[in-house]
Image (cartoon, rainbow, N blue to C red):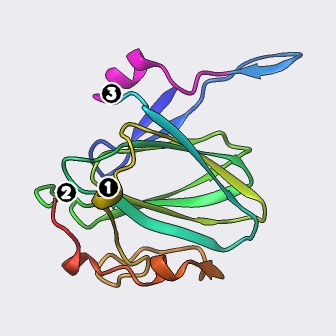
Amino acid sequence: MIFTETKLAGAFIIDIERLSDERGFFARTWCEDKFAAHGIHQPPLQSSISSNPKRGTLRGMHYQIAPHGESKLVRCTKGGIYDVIVDMREQSPTYGQWVGVELTADNFRMLFVPEYFAHGFITLQDNTDVSYQISAKYTPGAERALRWNDPAIGIEWPFEPVLLSEKDRNHPDIQMAVKL
């Protein structure tokens, strides 16, 4: 696996290293030693998927508050997404900054999302599936979110969403978000 740290400390774009032959290829998507070598000591405790039939579906921007922070390893297994994270760690020099990366079933790229980062995506294709490996159990009372189009953050989405839940449409701006 090839780890590329983003401008947000602790967040990595991860590309696979393919071992190819006439059958196709084989590649690791998780290796405790490789992740530990990059300071990641949060093995997955839960796995989830989302299925999104329509291009332009936006999910986000979600996170969990302390002490229930969760890191995520996100990969698109069908279709494509523009995946976005926002640093919600108030003491971080990159607090409120964002990074976006295209994850597709064809590029096999993954995004490691550290604890206390808001996460969301917009689907780039119809019939897109996303897989998550998550370091903590979902805790309903600890769930929080940011408004996807908060001008103070300035996320540059590739296009306007066509499908967005009422809940995701009404999240607060970062100034009103829970500080971590």
Q: Position of residue 62 (x, y in %)?
A: 40, 63
Q: The residue under label 1 is which amino acid type?
A: Phe
The correct choice, above or below, for 47 with respect to 93 in the image is above
Q: What residue would you read off at disc 2?
A: 89
Q: Nearer the viewer, mark 1 or mark 3?
A: 1
Q: Which residues are magenta?
A: 27-41
The correct choice, above or below, for 52 with respect to 159 in the image is above
Q: CA distance from mark 1 to mark 2?
A: 7 Å
Which secondary structure lies at badge 1?
strand
The correct choice, above or below, for 14 with respect to 26 in the image is below
Q: Residue at coordinates 64% horizontally, 72% vertically from top-left?
A: 57
Which mark identifies residue 38? Answer: 3
Q: CA distance from mark 1 to mark 3?
A: 18 Å
Q: Is 118 contained in the magenta span?
A: no
Is there CB contact under 8 Å for labels 1 and 2?
A: yes
Q: Residue at coordinates 74% horizontally, 44% vertically from top-left?
A: 106
Give the quarter of the image for residue 10: top left
Tell me the chief SS of the magenta region.
Answer: loop
Comparing 35 with 115, the one in front is 115
Q: Position of residue 9 (x, y in %)?
A: 26, 46
Q: What residue would you read off at disc 1?
A: 117
Q: The residue under label 2 is which amino acid type?
A: Arg
Which mark identifies residue 65? Answer: none
Q: Nearer the viewer, mark 3 or mark 2?
A: 2
> Residue reaching furthest right?
22
Upstream in sequence: badge 1 or badge 2: 2
Comparing 109 with 31, the one in front is 31
Q: CA distance from mark 3 to mark 2?
A: 19 Å
